[in-house]
Image: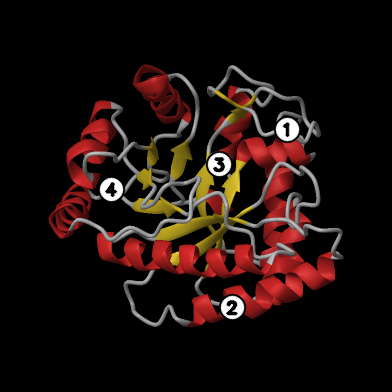
Amino acid sequence: MKRNPVGGHVPVAGGLAKVGLTYAREMAAEAVQVFVANPRGWATPAGNPAQDEAFRAQCAAAGIPAYVHAPYLINFGSHTAATVERSVESLRHSLRRARAIGALGVVVHTGSATGGRPRAQALAQVREHMLPLLEELTHEDDPFLLLESTAGQGSSLCSRTWDFGPYFEALDAHPRLGICLDTCHVFAAGHDLAGPGGTKETLDLLVDTVGAGRLKLIHANDSEAEVGARKDRHANIGRGHIGREAFAELFTHPETAGVPLIIETPGGKEGHAADVALLKELRPDP
């Protein structure tokens, strides 16, 4: 395996393997991320067993690590009981589907404290409802649950690196808990990856907060917005305010060794292929 497999989020409407992996091959992806449900809905559809097995087998044969992104509506910090209840079922569905297709992790947004609730109350709710899902991960081939911070909008529970500390504490630093670091999100939240040594400093802060080995996936996205703008606006690699030098620095930090990079950038297949190619160019030779 490369020091950092580089790939992207792929469409799967029409079949995980048939459509998703075809798209991945066309963009020369070495890693993939997929949705297993409508990302903007609560439905929990059953998979297609034939496509599941084909996806799992082809990823294994090609040495392609796969990941699932859970739906965006999930929020364990919500003041609405129905939202929390649906969040539990939606995340449980993503975790089970991830195991079925051989995915290594499920990415979930860390959510926000809605309804004017204090953060402590929202985090207590995270513990009550998310920790049991982690405790259900008892099989060797179960995925990691990967927390993804937001760009800092509203009453976000986790946007800066140190915010992962209370989140991990709420979940007893469960051994199946990890982090998906989105470069656009942390930049927009205030970590200046583009400044001198900014990427190293950010990763050092992350390790200081949750310990080494917790970073399992990186969403490699440039940012249309400036640092600290708290706006989630993805840009193609090298065409935003983060810049290509920061991504080159990303590859050299000890904590990122072996961690796949997934792009979620605009531009369709051509833009995605160009971003994958550029990240591979910035990646040091083994």
> Where 48 falls versus 85 (above or below)?
above
Mark before the other along the chain sequence, 3 or 1: 1
Label 2's element? helix
Mark before the other along the chain sequence, 2 or 4: 4
Residue at 16% from the left image edge and 60% from the top image edge: 49
Instruction: Assess disc 1: are there few (<14), some (14-19) or many (≥20) residues with their C-alpha within 10 Å of its C-alpha.
Output: many
| Location of residue 34 in the rendering, given as x and y in whole percent from the top left corner | 37, 46
Amino acid beneath label 1: Lys
> Spatial distance from mark 2 to mark 1, Cα to Cα?
29 Å
Q: Foreground mark, 3 or 2?
A: 2
Label 4's element? loop
> Spatial distance from mark 3 to mark 2, Cα to Cα?
33 Å
Examine the image and state in which quarter residue 252 appears: top right
Amino acid beneath label 3: Thr
Q: Which residue is under mark 1?
A: 231
| Location of residue 57 in the rendering, given as x and y in whole percent from the top left corner | 16, 55
Q: Which residue is under mark 3?
A: 252
Amino acid beneath label 2: Leu
